[in-house]
Image: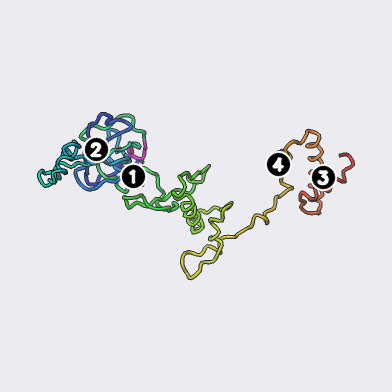
Amino acid sequence: MPEKAIEKTAEEIGTVISTPEGPSPGSVDFIVYTGVVHRGQFVEMDYAEGTLVCLVTNVMKSNRYFERFESVKEFERSGTKIFEQFPTAEWEYLVAMTRPLGAYDRGMIKRSTFPPSPGTKVRIATRPTLEKFLGFDLEKGLHIGEIEHHDTPVKINLSRLFQKHLAILAMSGAGKSFLMAVLIEELLNRKKEDGRIGVLVMDAHGEYRAFAEPVRDGKGVDFSAKTRFVRAGEIQIGVPKLSIGLLAALIPGLSAPQKRDLARVIDKLRREMKEGLGPFDFGAVKAEISRDAEI
């Protein structure tokens, strides 16, 4: 059965206005007449195809009494304050600029291809709107934080997040390492019945070493029982599992005869391993090449 349309219970905070740039499918501005709107906040409004969700990209204040810089300068120079002579507070306006993200209607999300009408009432996006529009997994998702200004937890579905490739991109100091630490904590705390995955961290700078160390003074969560720290020098390559193609990539410049001889040596060592001699390393490969009469 199709999902019910999102209930519009949020209080109206503004009205869409006409500007030289819009409203358009890529830009919608509105005048704020109640409350406070922040950059980075989400808003929603009625739309021909359901509920239009927009991201506030900028907020600007306007006041007719302060538009002419020469008048402001003359008033200040004379020692007379403009706000003491004129009702400036009554002429201050807050305009929010937004970028439409898409339209939500009965479980379907569509790209906005035409603008809303000027005069459309704007509301702060409700929690149900954001949860459904952004596709949060409320029951088993990884909790990585909250949406600023919205009191809405961000819970990302494990399968959708790690199904293929994931990149965390941001400027230096923006919090990439902190976000990664939060993801690791969520994975380590995850219940078995909710689905768990193994985590292998190649930590060149030692940023996540604390996960393998016991907590001191009882401060913080102790993950040391769930984490094993392995030094780089302890890591070994499973040589019997390496293919000739991979070995050729690790040893550039091998000729076709060299690849053929190396493949023959590897095959011989693998047969001996299966016969009970056990795994072999690169030292055994080197020794066998030295003993081989055909090379």
Q: Quadrant of the N terminus?
A: top left
Magenta segment includes 107: yes
Q: Amino acid at mark 2?
A: Phe
Q: Secondary structure at mark 3?
A: helix
Q: Is residue 97 above or below residue 224?
A: above
Foreground disc of the pair 2, 3: 2
Left or right: 14 as drawn, with respect to 213: left
Gap between marks 2 and 3, in whole Å?
A: 76 Å
The span shown in magenta is 103-109
Q: Residues within 10 Å of mark 1 (few under 14, many from 20)?
A: some
Residue 227 placement: quadrant: bottom right
Mark positioned earlier in the residue sequence (1 or 3): 1
Q: Is residue 122 left or right of residue 222?
A: left
Residue at numbered disc 3: 268
Local packing at callout 2 (Cα closer than 10 Å; few below 14, some 14-19, many 20+) is many
- Residue 219 in the image, given as x and y percentages of width and height: 46, 67
* Label 1 to label 2: alpha-carbon separation: 15 Å
- Which residue is at a point 54% across and 52% down the rendered structure image? 197
The residue tagged 4 is: 250
Q: Is residue 198 visible?
A: no
In x, y percent, where is residue 71? Answer: 16, 37
Q: Say if the magenta span includes residue 198.
A: no
Disc 3 to disc 4, how far (Cα)?
Answer: 21 Å
